[in-house]
Amino acid sequence: MNRRSFLVGSTIIAGSMGLGGVYWRQRWKYIVVHHSAGSYGNIEFLQQVHRQRQPSDPIDAIPYHYIIGNGKGLGLGQIDSDWRKQYDLWGSHVSSANSDHNFRGIGICLIGNFEKHKVPTRQYDSLVTLTKKLMKTYKITPNHVTGHGYLKGQSTKCPGKYFPMDKFKQDIRLG
Ligand SMILES: [Zn+2]
């Protein structure tokens, strides 16, 4: 291969990789809200849980893209993420019945068990702020924002009966 065809070839490859990169980072179409169902949590803790529950996941990270703390393990309302979001890798937060919600769905997990108690205000406010920011960044429409158990084919109670889904749906629509 001469220098010119090498340069042209490399430009095409780099260009298509660039386009692929744009697609990869812009592909997000859904936001799925979860609760951790436990009273304590941070990245390290959820990573350990994920290793035990889904040992076959090749990605040694938390199954979600973001977590929001409850003051135990991670500050109340504090948002954290790890390399799954850093590289925009697919999530592992819903079952295979909704694989598109893993591949193109951003998983947000609130630490806490909302089958047992309400969502603390500061944690809820962080969720609304983060969700609206992600909706704007990735042009995600409100009808594509939902909770884990609201997806067809998912039998979980996540994110819990006390998670205020109706209010949340209203709050993310407000400017
Ligand atoms: Zn869930």
Image: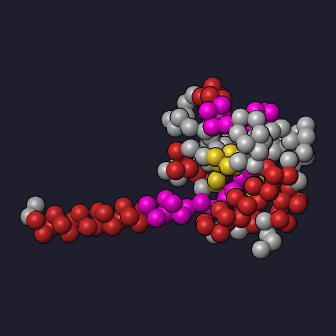
Which quadrant would the C terminus be assigned to in this image?
bottom right
Q: Which residues are magenta?
A: 21-47
Which quadrant would the N terminus be assigned to in this image?
bottom left
Q: Is residue 58 magenta?
A: no
Q: Is residue 2 left or right of residue 80?
A: left
Q: Is residue 151 visible?
A: no
Q: Is residue 157 left or right of residue 58?
A: right
Q: Residue furthest top?
A: 52
Q: Nearer the viewer, residue 66 or 17?
A: 66
Quadrant position of residue 166: bottom right
Which residue sits at x=56%, y=44%?
82
Q: Residue 105: x percent and y percent?
A: 64, 54
Q: Nearer the viewer, residue 57 or 172?
A: 172
Q: Is residue 116 visible?
A: yes
Q: Is residue 37 magenta?
A: yes
Tell me, what colour scheme is on the image?
Answer: secondary structure
Which residue sits at x=79%, y=50%?
123
Task: Using the image, determine if residue 86 lies above or below residue 2.
Answer: above
Q: How many marks?
A: 0
Q: Residue 99: x percent and y percent?
A: 63, 48
Which residue sits at x=85%, y=52%?
121
Q: Residue furthest bottom?
A: 175
Quadrant position of residue 46: top right
Q: Nearer the viewer, residue 121 or 89?
A: 121
Which residue sits at x=88%, y=60%?
167
Q: Residue 78: x percent and y percent?
A: 71, 48
